[in-house]
Amino acid sequence: MVKYILKRLVYIVVVFVILSFLMFLLYKLIPGDVVRQMLEPQRADLTPEQYAAEYARLTEYLGLDRPLVVQYWNWFTNLLRGNLGYSVTYMKDVSEVISEPLSNTLFLNVFSSIIALGITIPLGIRCAVKQKSLLDNGMQIFTILGISIPIYITALVMIYLFAVLIPIFPVSGMKAPGSSATGFEAFLERMYYFTLPVLVATVNSMASTFRYIRAAMINELSQDYIRTARAKGVREKVVIYSHAWRNALLPVITIIISWFTSLLGGWVMLETMFGLNGIGKLMILGLTQKDYQLVLAMQMIYVVIALMGRLLTDLSYGIVDPRVRVDK
């Protein structure tokens, strides 16, 4: 196991270096002048000579007068030290810019994921065992609607139900105007403002997750070893949860981990509709403002999360199913 992990870590490092260079090169090929963009707000207050001098100073300060390979090396070494670059939109370090949006997106994703999995796992197992029952048919209709309806439609329905028709939740924002709450009180206030977005994200995630779990369980329940276990008189709960569910976990684990890693990209539509300062909304803003240092840093965070997610998936296979030997 240790040998396999070391091999995969070397693989992760190699892929990370290659992707970092390709992405850095890609953003450098996009037309635009970062220095000119930084100086644009104060251009009217500068004479042509002052503007040229300031332009040359910032170009040298940012290292944009050096060869492309040198620029990449400086950026990459700074990245390894935790220096994610400088945002020309916010005029401060990228690490300071993304800290709050990243925590908000994680907050939204973690709570919605826990609720969605807590509901869909028992429901998926139940519907797989009781196929074509009233519950199963009802869930099939619900999941088809959930997959077909766009998330913004779900959000509008939830807003109408719980913010207009029954006004119990706020429509947008993350805290009350002028709020200075701290500690547990601030957490409760945040939970209150995040209730509607979490509810929408949960409903949106449940449909596809439920169908994966149900399909995996139906496939396992049709196997010969399940019929053999039942013929030997093994209790039905043991057959379902100890035999079938454990083997059904292999495809489910892949879906769950890939789901978690993709969710960190942010719910752009959801964050925009509910006025949340999330990572997805920040990514769109960075692209529209041509703040490529900001966008590039977030892309590299996604790369690390995706690579570690693949490693975690492989290791989980060996833990869940002893037949899988990841060290060979």
Image (spheres, rainbow, N blue to C red):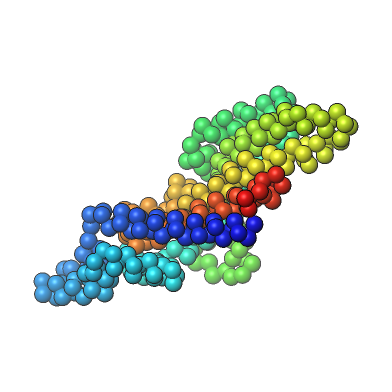
Q: Which image quarter holds the N terminus? A: bottom right
Q: Which residue is situated farthest in the left direction here?
A: 48
Asked if 324 appears above or below 299 in the picture, the reply is above
Task: Looking at the picture, tell me which residue is in the foreground, 187 or 303.
Answer: 303
Left or right for 64, reference 160: left
Give coordinates of residue 284: x percent, y percent.
37, 52
Total label count?
0
Residue farthest toward the front in the current orientation of the protein:
328
Q: Residue drawn at (62%, 36%), measured in percent from left and top?
A: 212
Q: Nearer the viewer, residue 205 or 236?
A: 236
Q: Residue at x 72, y 36 (%)?
A: 125
Q: State left or right for residue 307 relative to residue 230.
A: left
Q: Position of residue 283 (x, y in %)?
A: 40, 54
In this view, which residue lies farthest toward the top? 132
Query: Quarter of the image holding residue 83?
Result: bottom left
Residue 112 seen in the current view: no
